Image (cartoon, rainbow, N blue to C red):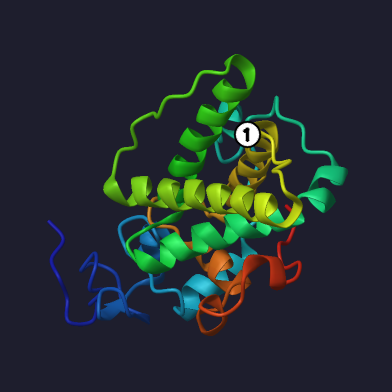
């Protein structure tokens, strides 16, 4: 049976030699535990240098390698370039809504936002195809609040259109496309690990905290980086 040695003092496995400080466990761990447990069992802070270094060297995610379910990407929904330009303010508004939700609830992780976007996309796809609307349950209160923030932004967008033009031209199919765009963006930005917040931090970068309270999405300019 392996026992802990004074020279092999990894705070996680207690077997291998520690070589780096982990702010999440408030101790020193070995590189193997850092690599294997990063964003899996270890809730890594966003400024951890080893996390940032790992992200720089990660390959873009793919359907096959990362076992992403194609159904969860709504590949049947086409996103023409023209839509991106015509609905830029809608995309910015929904991005802002996700950032706002994540900033209000620091426990939100990428997988929570992805779950909320999947349910919303399913709801709008059903609405577009059959005219039926009913809410699907989300697994956590945090996910429900994120979805509600997005729905509120859609409502406010329509109200703003009504106020400025006398009518709202936003179609449910437009909302569906915007949601699918953000969903694919989330899959492209996240590491896919259970505790990943890479997509959340991407959202924060689009709307820095100092600006979030004073910059409206429509005034923020184009900051979304297309996947």
Mark 1 is surrounded, within 10 Å at the Cα level, by few (under 14), some (14 to 19) or many (20 or more) other residues, namely few
Nearer-the-camera pick, 221 or 67: 221
Residue in the picture at 62% in, 47% down: 158
**Res 55 → quadrant:** bottom right
Q: Element type at marker 1?
A: loop
Residue furthest to the right in view is 82
**Res 17 → quadrant:** bottom left
Residue in the picture at 55% in, 21% down: 126
Residue 51 location (% of width, % of height): 48, 71
Residue furthest to the top in view is 130
Left or right: 203 as drawn, with respect to 194: right
Nearer-the-camera pick, 28 or 141: 141
Nearer-the-camera pick, 118 or 128: 128
Where is 141 relative to 208, above or below? above
Nearer-the-camera pick, 45 or 38: 45
Is any part of residue 192 visible from this angle? no
Where is 6 relative to 142, above or below? below
Q: Quadrant of the N terminus?
A: bottom left
Residue 201 location (% of width, % of height): 52, 68
Left or right: 195 as drawn, with respect to 92: left
Where is 206 relative to 119, above or below? below
Is any part of residue 132 visible from this angle? yes
Residue in the picture at 15% in, 71% down: 4
Where is 80 relative to 75, above or below? below
Residue 132 location (% of width, % of height): 51, 18
Left or right: 169 as drawn, with respect to 188: right
Residue in the picture at 70% in, 41% down: 170
Residue 148 location (% of width, % of height): 41, 48
Q: Which residue is mark 1?
A: 64
Q: What number of labels is visible?
A: 1
């Amino acid at each position: 049976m392996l026992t802990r040695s004074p020279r092999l003092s990894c705070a996680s496995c207690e077997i291998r030699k520690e070589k780096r400080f982990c702010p999440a466990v408030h101790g020193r761990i070995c590189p193997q535990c850092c690599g294997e447990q990063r964003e899996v069992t270890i809730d890594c802070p966003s400024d951890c240098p080893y996390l940032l270094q790992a992200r720089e060297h990660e390959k873009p995610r793919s359907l096959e390698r990362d076992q992403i379910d194609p159904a969860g990407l709504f590949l049947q929904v086409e996103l023409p370039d023209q839509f991106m330009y015509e609905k830029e303010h809608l995309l910015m508004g929904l991005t802002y809504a996700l950032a706002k939700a994540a900033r209000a609830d620091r426990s939100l992780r990428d997988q929570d936002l992805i779950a909320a976007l999947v349910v919303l996309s399913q709801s709008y796809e059903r609405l577009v195809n059959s005219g039926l609307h009913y809410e699907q349950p989300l697994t956590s209160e945090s996910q429900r609040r994120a979805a509600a923030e997005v729905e509120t932004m859609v409502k406010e967008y329509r109200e703003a259109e009504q106020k400025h033009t006398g009518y709202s031209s936003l179609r449910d199919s437009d909302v569906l496309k915007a949601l699918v765009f953000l969903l694919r963006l989330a899959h492209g930005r996240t590491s896919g690990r259970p505790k990943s917040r890479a997509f959340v931090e991407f959202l924060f970068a689009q709307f820095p905290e100092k600006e979030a309270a004073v910059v409206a999405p429509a005034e923020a300019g184009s900051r979304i980086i297309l996947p």
